[in-house]
Amino acid sequence: MNIFISVLVGYLLGSISFSYVFGQKLKKLDIRQHGSGNAGATNTLRVLGVGPAIGVLLLDALKGIVAVLLALYLAGEGLAPALAGLAAIIGHNWPIFLRFKGGKGVATTIGVLATLVFWPALIAGLVAILSIVVSRFVSLGSLLFLLLTTIITALFREYFAYPIEYVYLMIAVTILSFWRHRTNISRLIKGNESKIGQKANQ
């Protein structure tokens, strides 16, 4: 029952789209109909500006953090927090409150992984930030973050004493993220992906 509650709450938390809320409150618009059409922090930056984007990034990450902490409190380490974190990410991507059209789950994923596998996420995050600063491709940094966190977690799981469920979570989240970013990957390969500060490619 605790696992079920954790997953349900995680999904409902994830389904709260702060980019949509900010768009409605600040400019009476649906963020999904502007810019890249993605309900996330990067598109919020393009459409609403730096301040709202930072707010969305932090709040979306907080969804993942709260989902995992609640599961840890209710059921301890292992399956429950992994599933709750995954549910929060799925909720962000396919929110029940917005007819299942949401974002790509990067910020929520950051919150989940920073809570469950802090050191691998920190190392991967530093590399990802460096890649964004150099290339100005947020999508590239996001994918690097997921891939590196997964690799580091898998290689050093025993050293950090992480439950094996966390590795399974990492694999699932990485596959999901690469699939959600498939159009970005295609544009990166073709050389026409939008950079920070540029108008988004649809």
Image: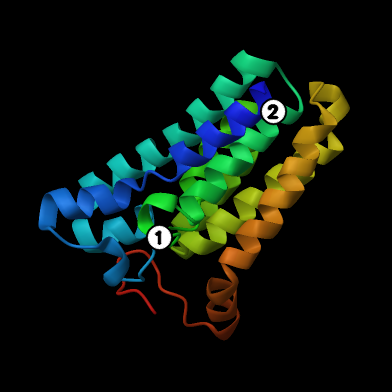
* Residue 171 x, y percent position in the rendering: 76, 49
Element class at badge 2: helix
The residue to which callout 1 is attached is 99
From this view, report whether residue 189 is shown above or below residue 170.
Answer: below
Query: Which image quarter: residue 55?
Result: top left
Q: Residues within 10 Å of mark 2 (few under 14, many from 20)?
A: many
Tell me: residue 72, above or below residue 57: above
Q: Which residue is mark 2?
A: 80
In this rendering, does residue 77 appear at all? yes
Q: Is residue 163 left or right of residue 51?
A: right
Name the residue nearer the viewer: 172 or 184.
Answer: 172
Residue drawn 47% across the image and 76% down it:
193
Quarter of the image that includes the N terminus: top right
Residue that appears at 59% across and 79% down = 186
- Count of residue discs: 2
In the image, what residue occupies the spot 63% across and 66% down?
A: 179
Res. 169 image quadrant? top right
70 to 110, vertically: above or below: above
Q: Disc 1 marks which amino acid?
A: Arg
| Residue under the image location 63 percent in, 55 percent down | 144
SS for callout 1: loop
Image position, residue 7 (x, y; %): 60, 34
Left or right side of 64 for 122? right
